[in-house]
Image: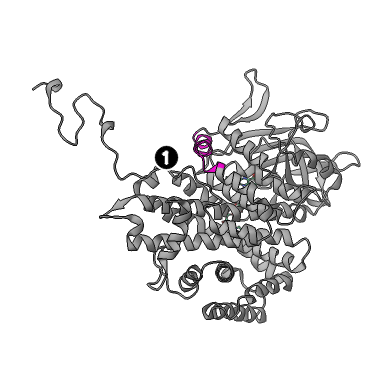
C-alpha cells in the first residue's frame, strides 16, 4: 500500500495531513475577559475600607480593560520585543535613544491616562488617593509589570522634587499631565513628562555613600555639572532623573534632564542595555555623564535625606507589585485547576491540590491586606503622627516580606499549571522572572531588614505605632497574643543588651510581618483564612513548602472564595 492509499488509523493523522487535526482535550481556556478588580473581593473591600471608595468606578474600569485579550496581548508583545538601544545614528552622531515596541507605548499610555504616575499629587487630591493608586498599580502589575518602572519612578520622584519648590513648580504641571508623550524632545516642548532615578554605581548600590560621580557648581547658582556614571539607570527615555553625586559638601541630590534648559541634548550617554533575567519590556541602561547639566534638589550634602522620600514611595510600589504578582499567579492557578482533570477529577477537587491552592490564597490575601494598609499609611501620615511612625517601619517590613514571598509563591502557582505553566504562552514564566526583582530593587532584602532595625532604634515612635496596631486585635486569638508577646520580650531583652543585632534582623522582620498580617486578617478577612494563616504561619502547624496546611484548615471555603468571583 502506498502512502497515498493508506487508511487513517484512529488517533493518528491521515498520511499527508497535519497532526494539528488531533482533537484538543482537557486543555484549559485562557483566563481572559474578566475584571481583575471585581474578581478580587479582598481588594474591592480594602479599597472601600481604606477611604478610596470614590475611585471604585475608575479602578473597576481599568480592571475590566486589563482582563481583555487586547491588554494581555500588549503585555506579551512588549516582552517578546525587547527595547533596542541606538547609541549613534547612521552618520556616527550620538543618538542615545532606546526604541520600544508599540505595545510598550500602549501600556505606558494606558497607565499615564489612568494617572498611575501622579494621582496622589494632583492639586484636587482626595483622601485615600494613595490607596486608590495602589489598587490601580496592583492591577496593572498583574498584566505587565515592566512598564510600571518609569510610572513608579515618576510618581515617587514628586515626593523628593518638592524639596526644591521652584523646580517642582516648573516640572509638576507636565508630570501631572494625563498625556503620554514619548517624543524625545526638550521637556518644554512636551505635553507630559516622566522621571527616573540614578543612584546605583559600579562600586555600590546599597551603599550609595560610595558614589564617585562628581558635581561641580556653575557660578553661584544651584546649577551643577555632573561627571561620572550610573551602573543601573532604568527607563532611560525618561525626561529627567533624580541622581546622587558628590558635591563639595558631600553626597547631594540633583535633577538631571535629558535636555538642558536651553534645549540642547544634555551630556547623558547611554553605554549599553542590561541583558536581564526578566523585566524585559523595560530598558535598564548603563549611563555616563560628561559635564551634564543638573539642578540641585534640597540641601547640598543631604542627598540621601532628599532622595529617601522617592525611595520610600518606590518601596511602597515594590510591595504593591509583589502583591499583584501573587494575586495574578493565584488567579491563574485556581483557574487552571478549575478546568483541568487528572485521575478522574478536576484538579481543584483533588484534596492535595486544594491544600496547595488554599495555602497560596492565604498568602495572597495577607499580602494584599498588608500592601493596602501600607498605602493607607501614606495617605494618613499627612495628618497623623502615629500613621507617620507606622509608615516608617511598615514600609521596610512590607517591602522585605512581600518581595521575599512572591518568588516562592509564584513558583508554586506556576507548578499548579503543570508543564503549561513552564511555557511562555502562559503568563507564568514572566511573573516568575519578574518576582525576584522587587526584592533587589530599592533596598535588597538585607538592607530592608537593617532598615527595620534602624526604625526600631532611632526613635521609639515606629515600634509604638506598630504595637498599637497589633494591640487592636489583642485577645482575638491566643496564638497571636503569644506570638506578639514573644516578639516584645525578645525586643526588650535585646534593648537591655544594647540594640538588636544585625545578624538576626531577618528573623525579627519576618516575625513582625507575620504578626501584622495575622492582625490584619483577623480584622478584615474570613475566620477561615485568619485561622489557617495563624495556625500555619504563627503556630508552627505548617511545613516548609506550600500545601502543608493543617487538617483543620477550612480549605474548601478558602478556595471557593477565590474561584467563584473568577467565574472559574
Ligand atoms: C533590573 C534592574 C533595574 C535597576 N534600575 C535601577 C535604576 O533605575 N536606578 C538605580 O539607581 N538603580 C537601579 N537598579 C539597581 C538596584 O537598585 C541595586 O542593584 C540594588 O540597590 C542593590 O545594589 P547592588 O546591586 O550594588 O548590590 P550590593 O549593594 O553590592 O548588595 C549585594 C547584596 O549585599 C547585601 N548587603 C548590602 N549591604 C549589606 C549589609 N550591610 N549587610 C548585609 N547585607 C548587605 C544586599 O542586600 C544585596 O543582597 C536596578 C537593578 C536591577 C536589577
Q: Residue farthest to the left?
A: 1
Instruction: Report which quarter residue 206 is drawn in.
Output: bottom right
Task: Specify how the rendered protein is coloured.
Answer: one colour
Residue depicted at x 61% and y 33%: 105
Residue depicted at x 52% and y 36%: 70
Please rate how many residues cluster around mark 1, counting C-alpha atoms within 10 Å: few if below 14, some from 14 to 19, many from 20.
Answer: few
Using the image as rendered, state which of residue 417 and residue 25 is in the foreground: 25
Whether residue 84 is situated above or below residue 160 in the rendered picture: above
Is label 1's Cβ within 8 Å of ligand 1? no
Residue 471 appears in the figure: yes
Horizontal and vertical percent position of residue 3: 14, 22
Instruction: Report which quarter residue 486 is drawn in.
Output: bottom right
Whether residue 189 is situated above or below residue 75 in the rendered picture: above
Q: Is residue 161 magenta?
A: no
Residue 446 appears in the figure: no
Q: Is residue 75 magenta?
A: yes
Horizontal and vertical percent position of residue 301: 81, 53
Quadrant showing the N terminus: top left
Residue depicted at x 80% and y 28%: 263
The residue that disc 1 covers is 425
Using the image as rendered, state which of residue 111 and residue 315 is in the foreground: 111
- Asked whether, in this view, residue 5 is left or right of residue 340, the answer is left
* Secondary structure at numbered mark 1: loop
Horizontal and vertical percent position of residue 359: 44, 63
Using the image as rendered, state which of residue 456 and residue 203 is in the foreground: 456
Residue depicted at x 21% and y 24%: 16
- Asked whether, in this view, residue 217 is left or right of residue 71, the answer is right
Question: Magenta segment, which residues?
Answer: 65-80
Amino acid at each position: 500500500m502506498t502512502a497515498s492509499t493508506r487508511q487513517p488509523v484512529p488517533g493518528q493523522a491521515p498520511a499527508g495531513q497535519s497532526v494539528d487535526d488531533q482533537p484538543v482535550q482537557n486543555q484549559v481556556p485562557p483566563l481572559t475577559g474578566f475584571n481583575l478588580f471585581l474578581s478580587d473581593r479582598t481588594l474591592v473591600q480594602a479599597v472601600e475600607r481604606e477611604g478610596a471608595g470614590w475611585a471604585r468606578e475608575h479602578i473597576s474600569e481599568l480592571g475590566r480593560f486589563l482582563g481583555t485579550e487586547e491588554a494581555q496581548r500588549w503585555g506579551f508583545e512588549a516582552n517578546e520585543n525587547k527595547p533596542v538601544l541606538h547609541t549613534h545614528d547612521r552618520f556616527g552622531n550620538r543618538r542615545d535613544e532606546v526604541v520600544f515596541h508599540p505595545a510598550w507605548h500602549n501600556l505606558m499610555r494606558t497607565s499615564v491616562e489612568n494617572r498611575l504616575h501622579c494621582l496622589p499629587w494632583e492639586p484636587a487630591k482626595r483622601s485615600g488617593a494613595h490607596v486608590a493608586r495602589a489598587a490601580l498599580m496592583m492591577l496593572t502589575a498583574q498584566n505587565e509589570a515592566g512598564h510600571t518602572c518609569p510610572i513608579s519612578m515618576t510618581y515617587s520622584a514628586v515626593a523628593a522634587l518638592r524639596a526644591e519648590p521652584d523646580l517642582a513648580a516648573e516640572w509638576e504641571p507636565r508630570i501631572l499631565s494625563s498625556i503620554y508623550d514619548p517624543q524625545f524632545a526638550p521637556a518644554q516642548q512636551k505635553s507630559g513628562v516622566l522621571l527616573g532615578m540614578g543612584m546605583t554605581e559600579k562600586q555600590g548600590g546599597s551603599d550609595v555613600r560610595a558614589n564617585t560621580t562628581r558635581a561641580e557648581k556653575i557660578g553661584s547658582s544651584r546649577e551643577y555639572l555632573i561627571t561620572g556614571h550610573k551602573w543601573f539607570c532604568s527607563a532611560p527615555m525618561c525626561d529627567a532623573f533624580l541622581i546622587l553625586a558628590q558635591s563639595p559638601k558631600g553626597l547631594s541630590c540633583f535633577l538631571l534632564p535629558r535636555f538642558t534648559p536651553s534645549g540642547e541634548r544634555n551630556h547623558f550617554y547611554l553605554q549599553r542595555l542590561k541583558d536581564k533575567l526578566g523585566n524585559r519590556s523595560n530598558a535598564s541602561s548603563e549611563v555616563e555623564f560628561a559635564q551634564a547639566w543638573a539642578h540641585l534638589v534640597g540641601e547640598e550634602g543631604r542627598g540621601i535625606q532628599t532622595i529617601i522620600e522617592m525611595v520610600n514611595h518606590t518601596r511602597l510600589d515594590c510591595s504593591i507589585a509583589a502583591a499583584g504578582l501573587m494575586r495574578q499567579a493565584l488567579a491563574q492557578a485556581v483557574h487552571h485547576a478549575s478546568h483541568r482533570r487528572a485521575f478522574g477529577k478536576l484538579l481543584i477537587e483533588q484534596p492535595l491540590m486544594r491544600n496547595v491552592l488554599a495555602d497560596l490564597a492565604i498568602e495572597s490575601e495577607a499580602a494584599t491586606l498588608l500592601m493596602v494598609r501600607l498605602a493607607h499609611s501614606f495617605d494618613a501620615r499627612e495628618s497623623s503622627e502615629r500613621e507617620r511612625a507606622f509608615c516608617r517601619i511598615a514600609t521596610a517590613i512590607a517591602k522585605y516580606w512581600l518581595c521575599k514571598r512572591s518568588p516562592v509563591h509564584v513558583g508554586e502557582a506556576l507548578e499548579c499549571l503543570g508543564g503549561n505553566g513552564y511555557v511562555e504562552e502562559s503568563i507564568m514564566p514572566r511573573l516568575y522572572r519578574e518576582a525576584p526583582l522587587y526584592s533587589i530593587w530599592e533596598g535588597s532584602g538585607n538592607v530592608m531588614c537593617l532598615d527595620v532595625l534602624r526604625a526600631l532604634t532611632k526613635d521609639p515612635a515606629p515600634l509604638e505605632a506598630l504595637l498599637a496596631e497589633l494591640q487592636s486585635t489583642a485577645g482575638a486569638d491566643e496564638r497571636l497574643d503569644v506570638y506578639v508577646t514573644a516578639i516584645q520580650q525578645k525586643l526588650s531583652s535585646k534593648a537591655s543588651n544594647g540594640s538588636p543585632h544585625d545578624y538576626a534582623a531577618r528573623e525579627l522582620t519576618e516575625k513582625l510581618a507575620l504578626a501584622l498580617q495575622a492582625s490584619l486578617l483577623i480584622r478584615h478577612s474570613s475566620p477561615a483564612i485568619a485561622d489557617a494563616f495563624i495556625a500555619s504561619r504563627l503556630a508552627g502547624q505548617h511545613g516548609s513548602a506550600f500545601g502543608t496546611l493543617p487538617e483543620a484548615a477550612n480549605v474548601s471555603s478558602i478556595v471557593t472564595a477565590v474561584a467563584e468571583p473568577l467565574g472559574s
